[in-house]
Amino acid sequence: MTSVRVNPDALSVLDRPNSYIGKTVPRPNLERLLQGRGLYVSDIELPRMAHVVFLRSPHAHAKIVGIDAAQARAMPGVIAIVTGQELAAVITPWVGVLSHLKGLKSAPQSAIAIDRVCWQGEAVAAIVATSRAAAEDAAEHVAVEYEELEAVTDMRTALDPATSVIHASLGDNLAFERVHVAGEVDQAFADSDEVVETEFIFGRHTGVTLEPRSVVADWNAAEARLTIYQGTQAPHMVQNIVALHLGLREAQVRVVCKDVGGSFGIKVHIYADEMATYALSKLLRRPIKFVADRVESFNTDIHARDHRCRGKIGVKRDGTITAFEIDDLTGIGPYSMYPRTSAIEANQVVNLVGGPYTSKNYRARARVVFQNKNVMCQYRAVGHPIACSVTEGLVDLAAMKIGMDPLEIRRRNLIADDAYPCGSPSGLRFEKLSHHASLAKLVKMMDYDALRAEQAALRKKGIHRGIGIASFIEVTNPSAAFYGVGGAKISSQDGVAVRLDAQGSVICATSITEQGQGSESLTAQIVGSVLGVSTDRVRVILGDTDMTPYGGGTWASRGAGIGGEAALQATKILRKNILDVAAVILQSTPDELDIANNAVVNASDGAPRIELNELARVVYFRPDTLPPGIQPELMATKHFVPREYPFAFTNGVQASWLEVDTETGFIRLLKHWVVEDCGTIINPQLVDEQIRGGVVQGLGAALFERCIYDERGQLTNANMADYLVPMSGEMPDIDVGHVVSPTLESELGAKGAGEAGTAGAAAAVSNAVNDALQPFGVTITEIPLTPQVVLTALGRV
Amino acid sequence: MKAAAFAYARATSVANALDLLAAHGDRAKVLSGGQSLMPAMNLRLISPELIVDIGELTELRGITVRGDVLVIGALTRHVELLKSPDIAAHAPLLVDAVAHVAHPAIRNRGTLGGSLAHADPASELPACMLALDATIIVRGPGGERRIAAEEFFTGIYETALAPQELLVAIELPVAKKGSVHFFHEFARRHGDYAIAGLAAQASIDGGRFAGLRLGFFAVGDRPLLANAATRLTGVEVSAAVLTEACAALDAELDPQEDQQASPEMRRHLARVLLKRGVAALLGRPELGAGATT
Amino acid sequence: MPISLQVNGERVEANVLPRVNLADFLREHLKLTGTHVGCEHGVCGACTVRVNGEIVRSCLMLAVQTNGTSVETIEGISDSGEIADLQAAFRDRNALQCGFCTPGMLMAAQDLLQQKREPGRDEIREHLSGNYCRCTGYQAIIDAVESTARARMGRTP
């Protein structure tokens, strides 16, 4: 990693001797994962625990005429078979809407379908048995009589008057529509030298977390408390919602989140089958375990990105982009997901298109429609890959039209690095971005001119390689603007409590969660740096609503920026409290003292004065030796939420270098570069690996991943052999560079980095493919770019 | 997802296995390496009543050379094909092919006999059997049958093997001196089933094919020994001859549609494979370079 | 059915139903939960273990088939110290995020390193191409395996 700091601050609490900030420190939780000693939900077993299997609808849309479970109930190991109607006695339905997404509507959804199933895979009955295998055996003998209804599958015709309406009470299949107009769009197109318009198609895909969604719910009837073991990104959100729908107080619900086998936004939602599992535990008064199998993961984990977006760009001959226009359509399945809703992705597309550029003329429409397919919702980099592919695809098409190099058109239109703070035509506010510095760095890293020369030389030999560039902006550190203002009880605050233990180590409880990003590590690094102790003396506790402060969790790239700042502020207080006591013990003043290397030292010369373990011994065991009236406080808690900006925008740029076999349509990725600006970098290795992992998820969307539905709403590739994700053999090495523009909203200055890789990868690949295919006069604006798509575009098949 | 319950019998000999199969017919399934059977059972796509595990039948193992015949036991695992010096010397096409079969952990369990009996039209080894002119040896209640590879594969997952029979070995003529081979497949990712593939074995005399066997796979309901090879044999191969051969190949194909490719695309890729294969076998890159339409 | 086998060097006698696969046997009967189950149809590689020294997908093998064999899991090869260097390389390179694929990935990587002293990056990528990782993008894993190979050759990583 290399980085350039564009606006260095004065020395802060982070710029201390032995600071861990900006250093690669191995994550403290890795050893247990490396030795197979982690604890994932699927590993958990409790006394009297039973297993639930959900019988799922084979139809995309059908009335449930009757369920006959008599034979199944008599099978070995079966404890209970519960229908939606029966479960409704202990859990209420929900509606996934938010008030700030004006006009968004959805229908009440139940934990288990009651009268009607609305997608293939919706649960119709729960079979609880002594083992998963026994429950599956019984499930084969539950007879459900269905009356098939017309399935609405094609989003393009979902709003046609001839198409049946999925939820009659809603009047039509339109869940949400947003129209946004800024500037003088028609005039701008009229004044353009060229106007390019095309349709971009994005395949529906999903997260494929390697550990499927899993829950163990344990209702202790005697305590009247429900303990939920779940790999969730947002424990307090789950706590709140479970309490609401099971008629409990939050204090009666504990959510414990141990190791999580991948999440990427898949595990931040409330799923019907998980709600059913909580309710079954309460109903049956025993622990119930649900572990989705891979087929039901494909059928029920949220899908994302099923968009068709018409895009239009105007450009002048000198390269000036005059206007952007989009018309986006997306199908979200039969319900808006709860509680974050399924309108956020389309809303983000409207927000983000054209975001990196100076053009002020922008018109957008987004429509979100219901269909009888699995639910769609927020997955890593929500909306970003669509907005970026549309924007950057249009910019490249415009450049091609006027014969300008793709780099040059970006140089002429990206918002200048000294123009901040400023706003976007969609109303976003940018505090400080670095598009030009990032682009300049990318060009250097990839040696753009040499690559162009190589491309030209190979083209003469019939080898078709392409370079694709994609600039992007990324939403991170969300404030209440994301969900809270719309009425969702999802905390935008995060909190950290730190205390010095009796041997001078630090126990730190944080409300952010860990799914592999390095939340534990970055928290320890911040606490260790601010306090002056080594990270091996910092124990971080996460993922337990009984043990940690209240907070949002880890999603939307908020862990480092929000949870990290809370850790910083809490540790500052603890540090002050320690120095106050130390001054008393040492008969000095706090100003003359500091903490370094696990000891209180002289601020002047760093000479050790008292070890922290000795100070703790005095405070905890011999407070009688302190002067009268001294009440030491070796624990501190702070919360943080961004208040000035609703989101901390980051930016970056990606480049792809690839080869297209124009005879076969196969694409070989040769190299990928990313330069991004997430502000203060706490742990460079963790940031780089977030970027790389994110890029590869984006490359999956670009080349491989697609949920293939037939016209009857059947998902036809719901297994790992047919749904293709990127594997090591096809992935390129990815070089990552950084520009550093810290946010001034926090002392830490960190912004998020989790979405950046995914945001721009597909756009870079698409642009590279179109660059490679220039000699053939062919452009493709559809992903995944399968060999079939490429060969079809080339007219070979 | 867990496999449905079944009874399990560990066969103690081929005769014992045949007795079990005779008693249970198509309610029984033979478990060899299990790398295709187990996924299907775990997904409950099939639920046999009895599993006959032949894994311990040492008489079905081993690779031996008898004169100019290579005999490979049905239980020979992919990894053994990959590492055997006899295979490398006498049927090197198999080494190239096996490297494309799934992944190391699968190749450590999957067997030759299992792959042939499963007869997935997209798998590599059946096509190799055609290219290598193999004889499939099966044993049943009525004794041993020897079936030419061309007669063995009869459709998607269908073979000439009867439910009461067991595939015990295959025989191949050892590769002659001066013979060459070509293996290539188009698959989306390493180890995936091919969209189209070609296993070819040839002998070359004076720059011409003296013999040429082209085993295409994933381009129909079974592997195809292409007659188009006759157009290329004994003649000076020019671009025009190759184009004719491509047309002849096209007429032989009946490709299926699936999520990866349309029939048209499979036809196209088969033609590309033919051109590239011939170019590689003859050592004339120019033949493979031109556009294939 | 009664089976008798070695698991991580310990003798195990058990009675299992024929339908129990090796992954479930290890996890549910022996509580060796380091072997992970990601797909149960032989694709993801998370359940990779060694049987008689060779890596296999434990979801594609019946427990009854392991009668008389020696099975090694991530717990076993961690405790023996066999892959301590590889694990250290994974840790230093952050070659895991959620860690769910890691036991299987380590099994496959060690298998390669035992067969090939100094594999190239492409060979590493190919050997691991049957092991899903959704977090890392693979590069860190390739780096860690490459540096372990070099270190085992006595060279600086």
Image (cartoon, rainbow, N blue to C red):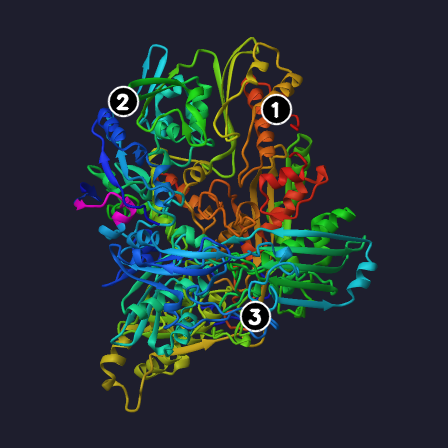
Labels 2 and 1 in the same subunit? yes
Q: Dot 2 corresponds to which residue?
A: B141
Is residue A541 visible from the viewing direction of this image?
A: no
Q: Which residue is mark 3?
A: A169
User: Mark 3, chain letter?
Assistant: A
Q: Is A772 placed left or right of C17 in the picture?
A: right
Can you give x and y, in whole percent of width and height, for residue A638 in the image?
A: 43, 77
User: Which residue was labeled with disc 1?
Assistant: B288
Q: Where in the figure is residue A340, as x and y percent of width and height?
A: 51, 68
Dot 1 crowding, Cα within 10 Å, few <14, some 14–19, many 20+: some
| Residue B145, disc | none
Q: Are marks 3 and 1 on the same chain?
A: no
As measured in the structure, the alpha-carbon distance from the residue carrying label 2 to the one carrying label 1 is 49 Å
Q: Earlier in the sequence, mark 2 or mark 1?
A: 2
Distance between mark 2 and mark 3 Cα atoms:
67 Å
In the rendered view, does C19 fall on the left or right side of C97?
A: left
Please, what is the three-letter code of the amino acid marked with disc 3?
A: Ser
Q: Is residue B90 magenta?
A: no
Q: Nearer the viewer, mark 3 or mark 1?
A: 3
The quadrant the C terminus of chain A occupies is: top right
Magenta segment boundaries in residue numbering: C13-26
Q: Position of residue B265 (x, y in %)?
A: 59, 34
- x%, y% of residue A641? 50, 75
Disc 2 is placed on an element classified as loop
Foreground pick, C87 / B266 = B266
Q: How packed is label 2: few (under 14 Cα within 10 Å), some, or many (20 or more)?
A: few
Q: Are marks 2 and 3 in contact (CB under 8 Å)?
A: no
Name which residue type carries label 1.
Gly
Tell me which residue sits at (38%, 44%) in the image: C41
SS category of the residue bearing label 3: helix
